[in-house]
């Protein structure tokens, strides 16, 4: 099996898709702030009729994500969840989807509270365990939906193996690639059918917009998703399309710093007796280390860790000076959160704890500030939080 190669993506980040304006030579794609386009005769136009169906600024972004993921077709949505809703609308009443058991909370809510009402069912399994995935497949199952790494425990699933299982059973394979981005991992190259992003996170990168992206290789699948994008209407507007293209240009330099900072913070946490366990796929002790190394460039910049019982996490959070206590991730600024009371609070305590999400678990999105400043801030706060 080949190792992840990252040649050419740095150039694609800057010049991929439609990266300039042919009519004026402007080095950036203009913001086409228009809802409609004049026609010379009914149905005779320059490729655009109405901006829900197509807009040149959004089109530039859609071609960019297709190129970055090494796919053939891209789609931009008003949010990650709008992208996920549109992809899930491929299925119909009676269909079932096999999903990672620690899938993003909003995705779980969408499946559990919305799509089940339309008869689309889901089964949750530990997708790191391929035997569990196989045994969940029956005649009604139409898709496998995974996140790798998962959230917040950064579990790793073998993407190539999932794609192979899906193809063997005629299922659509879907990867939410938000935590890694195509700079670190490209699931379409490993045989996956659909890649989804919450571009709100690393792709946008500056915590200043909400957006979702989808990339696929297959033409027929692209036609179905394109139809649903227009029919459902959850499209990304021109200004945010522009902002997202702008954010993506610096993805490579940002990710390099995010990852080296994360590796440094992990090395500092590993020295502390206060820290019972570190979840980071770039650590040799992580159970998914070898699989992650095979399919991704590195372990990314999301780090979760568990403190020993003798800590007050409220004191920890209120002692931080640089790191912000907030939901979300992937921005230039370091963000920290407490899954038990924030992102995963809706899961009953017993189930949550059985899944490894105890009260001492903390999730960190390592930003691009000075690595030592981030680590010092965190470690000072951990020390102050000792009971
Ligand atoms: C944030 C997130 C989403 C949802 O995206 P929005 O842009 O907030 O709608 C989906 N998947 C993952 C992994 C996320 O982190």
Image (spheres, rainbow, N blue to C red):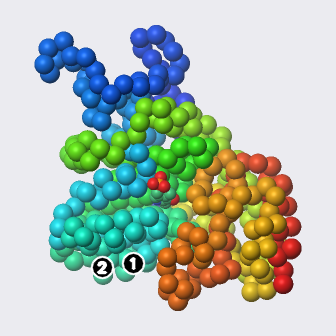
Kindly identify which numbered label has been placed on residue 125.
1
Say how many tags the image has. Answer: 2
Q: Residue at x 30, y 81 (%)?
A: 135
Residue 217 vs residue 168, the one in the foreground: 217
Q: Position of residue 271 (x, y in %)?
A: 82, 73
Q: CA distance from mark 2 to mark 1?
A: 8 Å
Viewer-nearest residue: 79 or 250: 79
Give the vertical position of 272 relative to 10 (above or below).
Answer: below
Element type at marker 2?
A: helix
Q: In the figure, is residue 268 to the left or right of 62?
A: right
Q: Where is residue 113? Give x, y as percent.
A: 33, 70
In this rendering, is residue 130 above or below 35? below
Q: Residue at left 29%, top 44%?
A: 233
Q: Are marks 2 and 1 in contact (CB under 8 Å)?
A: yes
Looking at the picture, tell me which residue is in the foreground, 275 or 235.
235
Residue found at x 37% / y 77%: 124
Is residue 26 toward the left or the right of residue 281 in the image?
A: left
Identify the residue at horizontal 41%, vertical 36% (top origin): 237
Secondary structure under tag 1 reads strand
- The reply, left or right, for residue 8 in relation to residue 137 is right
**Label 2 vs 1, first from the N-terminus:** 1
- Ligand 1 neighbours mark 1 (CB distance < 8 Å): no
Instruction: Kindly indicate the quadrant of the structure image that contains residue 38.
Output: top left
Frontmost residue, 114 versus 15? 114
Crowd band around label 2 with a 10 angstrom C-alpha radius: few (<14), some (14–19), many (20+) = some
Instruction: Kindly identify which residue carries mark 2.
Output: 136
Disc on res. 186 = none
Quarter of the image that includes the C terminus: bottom right
Q: Position of residue 60 (x, y in %)?
A: 41, 30
């Amino acid at each position: 099996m080949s190792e992840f190669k990252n040649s050419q993506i740095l150039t694609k980040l800057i010049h991929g898709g439609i990266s300039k304006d042919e009519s004026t030579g402007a080095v950036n794609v203009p913001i086409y702030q228009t809802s409609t386009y004049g026609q010379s005769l009914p149905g005779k136009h320059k490729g655009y009729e109405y901006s829900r169906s197509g807009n040149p600024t959004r089109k530039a972004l859609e071609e960019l994500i297709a190129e970055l993921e090494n796919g053939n077709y891209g789609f931009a949505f008003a949010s990650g969840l709008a992208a996920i809703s549109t992809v899930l609308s491929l299925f119909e009443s009676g269909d079932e989807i096999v999903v990672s058991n620690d899938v993003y909370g909003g995705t779980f809510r969408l499946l559990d509270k919305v799509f089940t009402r339309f008869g689309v069912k889901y089964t949750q399994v530990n997708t790191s365990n391929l035997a569990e995935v196989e045994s969940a497949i029956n005649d009604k199952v139409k898709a496998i939906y995974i996140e790798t790494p998962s959230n917040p425990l950064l579990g790793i699933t073998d993407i190539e193996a999932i794609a192979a299982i899906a193809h063997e059973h005629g299922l659509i394979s879907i990867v939410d690639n938000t935590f890694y981005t195509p700079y670190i991992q490209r699931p379409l190259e490993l045989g996956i059918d659909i890649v989804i992003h919450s571009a709100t996170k690393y792709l946008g990168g500056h915590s200043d917009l909400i957006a979702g992206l989808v990339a696929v290789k297959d033409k027929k699948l692209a036609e179905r998703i394109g139809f649903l994008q227009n029919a459902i209407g959850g499209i990304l507007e021109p200004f945010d399309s522009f902002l997202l293209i702008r954010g993506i240009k610096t993805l490579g330099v940002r990710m390099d710093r995010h990852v080296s900072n994360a590796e440094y913070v992990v090395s500092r946490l590993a020295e502390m007796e206060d820290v019972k366990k570190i979840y980071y796929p770039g650590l040799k002790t992580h159970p998914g280390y070898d699989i992650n190394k095979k399919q991704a460039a590195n372990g990314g910049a999301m780090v979760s860790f568990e403190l020993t019982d003798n800590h007050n996490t409220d004191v920890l959070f209120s002692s931080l000076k640089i790191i912000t206590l907030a939901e979300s991730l992937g921005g230039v600024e370091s963000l920290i959160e407490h899954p038990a009371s924030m992102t995963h609070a809706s899961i009953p305590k017993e189930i949550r704890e059985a899944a490894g999400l105890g009260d001492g678990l903390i999730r960190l999105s390592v930003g691009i500030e000075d690595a030592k400043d981030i680590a010092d801030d965190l470690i000072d706060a951990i020390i102050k939080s000792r009971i």
